[in-house]
Amino acid sequence: MQVTFIKPTIGCLDDGERFVDEARMEPLSLGLLAGMTPPGVDCRLFDDRIDEIDYDEPTDLVAINVETFTARRAYEIAAEYRARRVPVVMGGMHVTLLPGEVAKHADAVYTGDGESLWAQVVADAHAGCLRPRYHGILGLPQLGVKPRRDLYAGKNYLPISLLQFGRGCQFKCEFCAVSQYFGHCHYARPVEEVVEEINSLSCKDLFFVDDNFVANPEAAKALLRALIPLKVRWVSQASIDHTRDPEMMRLLVESGCLGNVIGFENLDINNLRQMRKAANLTTFDGYAEEVATLRDYRLQTWAAFALGYDHDTADSILETCEWGIANHFTFAAFNVLMPYPGTPFYERLKAEGRLLYDGRWWLHPDYRFNHAAFRPVGITADELTETAWACRKRWSSWTSIIKRGLDLHTNMANPFRFAIYCAYNPLYRREAFKKQSMHLGTQ
């Protein structure tokens, strides 16, 4: 039996050319599904961000990972296979949040985590009795399973190994689809299994793809202590509240942490309250203490911002960009706030009649990547789109890159950190300009 795993691209550029992602990382979720596939089944991976999919190559089952931004393209790919009478199963966060929509484009819909039922899906497909719905339970990830990293060979992913320690987050941020998916719970792997996986890797530069690495502080500290003798370098995603825990900060540094993606989200406390960003509100003072702590520990930071909440204006958004430059963050994401389906934010905007593109921006032919999909309060939707784009251009300007790079506390703390800074900032600059206003889907 042959199973084909597919990672869809987002869409295409104005000239119709399929978007090829230079900054692509390993599709860990598909590698894990392949690792959960029973022995004796051949597995193949098409990464639509780089590969040309050969729809006519024989296969018995196609498994497509669907994210909200890739849903339109995922449905295009599924249609090609189903026209050839190849069964298609779709899974992922978007599928769990909108199973009814996805079911129109797939032979089988898989909601929830893959560990509990993926082997059953493969067995059913092999027997010709694939069910229309499977619901995997949420729980401890990857028990006894490692991803099939051999499937990544030859695809020129960034030189960093992806793995996970935990899934989910206990916070209830209004806009967060992850929080909804996991029911505000966090599930962590046994430390010894994480260590075993790391020891099996050839690359010791790691990215923990956790939604919030420090969601369970004591579990995180146990892993950090185990990482210290492994001599790895790593990054992850973490809520800002970890900076208030001196032991956590010390262990991060000793374990090889280079820095984390941190959701600052906004500089206005009224916006933070509206989005229910609990981790940021505990001792909010404009993040002065938290940023100082990150600098004291020589950590490089990828700052994430959510732009378009009700107290935002064009001026406040532009000031956020200048604040990030002044603090010499290594990277930053100036994200137009997106109403993801199934989130409290989406439901609030729907009730207020503020959704654009008929409420399903991810499928609408007129929607463009990084554009506003709702009517903000303080500015228009077009102004939000243009102002966020102005932030990205300003952040990615050579003046900004040089200014931020010349920071002895973080980006120039040692030669390796400076090399990372110099290698990836130009890459992300190119990606920012390529992706702006991109079409979703390719047809």
Image (tube, grey):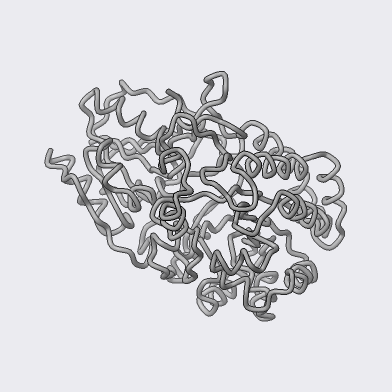
Residue at 42% in and 69% down: 184
Residue at 38% in and 55% down: 342
Q: Which quadrant is home to the N terminus?
A: top left
Residue at 86% in and 42% down: 399
Visible residue check, residue 19: yes
| Relative vertical location of residue 245 with respect to residue 364 in this rendering, above or below | below
Q: Please state the horizontal and vertical placement of residue 101, each as a whole percent of the image.
A: 30, 42
Single out the residue that lies furthest toward the top: 15
Q: Quadrant of residue 348?
A: bottom left
20 to the left or right of 327: left
Compare residues 319 and 430 and report the one nearer the observer: 319
Residue at 80% in and 56% down: 328
318 to the left or right of 345: right
Visible residue check, residue 195: no
Q: Please state the horizontal and vertical placement of residue 29, each as a whole percent of the image.
A: 42, 49
Q: Please state the horizontal and vertical placement of residue 410, each as a whole percent of the image.
A: 80, 60
Q: Quadrant of residue 109?
A: top left
343 to the left or right of 310: left
Compare residues 168 and 199 and report the one nearer the observer: 168
